[in-house]
Amino acid sequence: MSLPPALAALLAPPDPTRLPLPPAALPAAGVRLLRGVPYLVPDGRRPLELDLWLPAEPAGPLPVVVFVHGGAWRTGLRDDLGPAFRSWRPGPFARLAQAGFAVACADYRLSGEAVHPTQVDDLTAALSWLHARSGELGLDTARTVVWGESAGGHLAALLALTMPDRDPEVPPVTGCVTWYAPTDLVALTEDPADPRTFEAMLVGGAPADLPERARDAGPVHHVTSAAPPFLVLHGTQDSVVPSDQAVRLAAALRGAGVSVDLHLVPGADHLWHGLTPSGAEDCFTRSLDFVRARTADSASG
């Protein structure tokens, strides 16, 4: 089947920077939510969307938090900070909006759809979309922190460390928060010859067969002196991603002269399992304090 040129142009994927924004919902006091905004419409693939949480009455251009969900790169929901926070009312993203931040929770292609580095390419496109529409949305993208948990923390770290080389038109991020994130996939993989691990599915095959791609997928291998400050939180009893992964990233950052706050949370397993509610809230508060510090006007100068 072939199409006349005029129809072919109409059927081409639309430019998401020009699509109309959805009507805002009001999910909590003082909060507006633009849910399901397309930020990338690749040809032959599903559109990728983000949710944008905003203060209802912003005082000026808003600092930005870009949240990246976990799920072993295989599953997950873009607006899920983890089981410790699902019962919060208002939820964690509404609380960040109430604190004066714009929060973008972005989809990315999972490992069943595409392999590394597609996931970071998708998140780069999300940052590019936010920057392109920053005037319309009242965003200050020169004050942006990326924050991710588990596999999302891995992707957030990769994004923070490689963004200047990916899209020089977008300001580099001013900080990165990782929660219990893989940081060195080569060291994490128990059997590098096994093609069935989550790490293998991310890189498209057994790490032993794809050593360069597996290395490239590790944030520790992208650390330079130009990296932004990091807050690295990890449970000492993590049975899924050992806390040594956090120690490796912190050591690489310190070795490059980059500011990093490593906080190993006593007794916590993956997803903050085993923490009391107050312990989980402390992790959130530490992260919020870091975001505030890294998006203050002086931090962007």
Image (tube, rainbow, N blue to C red):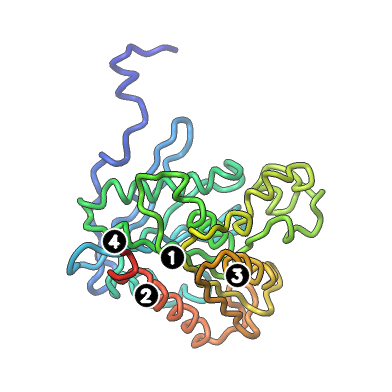
| In the rendered image, the vertical position of residue 108 relative to residue 261, given as above or below | above
Q: Residues within 10 Å of mark 4 (few under 14, many from 20)?
A: many
Mark 3 / mark 1, whichever is N-terminal: 1
Q: Secondary structure at mark 4?
A: strand
Q: Nearer the viewer, residue 62 or 11?
A: 62
The kind of residue tagged 3 is: Ala
> Of circles 4 and 2, which is in front?
2
Q: Quadrant of the N terminus?
A: top left
Give the residue number, with chain letter if any, for mark 1: 175
- How far is the residue under mark 1 from the one under mark 4? 24 Å
Q: CA distance from mark 1 to mark 2?
A: 9 Å
Give me the residue at 47% from left, 73% from top.
86
Q: Name the residue tied to disc 2.
A: 293
**In the image shown, does 33 or 232 lie closer to the viewer?**
232
Question: How dense is the environment of label 3, judged by Cα within 10 Å: few (below 14), some, or many (20 and up)?
Answer: many
Q: Alpha-carbon distance for marks 4 and 2?
A: 24 Å
The mark lying in front, picked from 4 and 3, is 3
Secondary structure under badge 2?
helix
Say the numbered circle drawn on residue 250.
Answer: 3
The answer to whether the residue labelled 1 contacts the one labelled 4, judged by CB atoms less than 8 Å apart, is no
Identify the element where label 1 is drawn.
Answer: strand
Q: Which mark is residue 33?
A: 4
What's under tag 1, amino acid-wise? Gly
Marks 4 and 3, the one that precedes in the sequence: 4
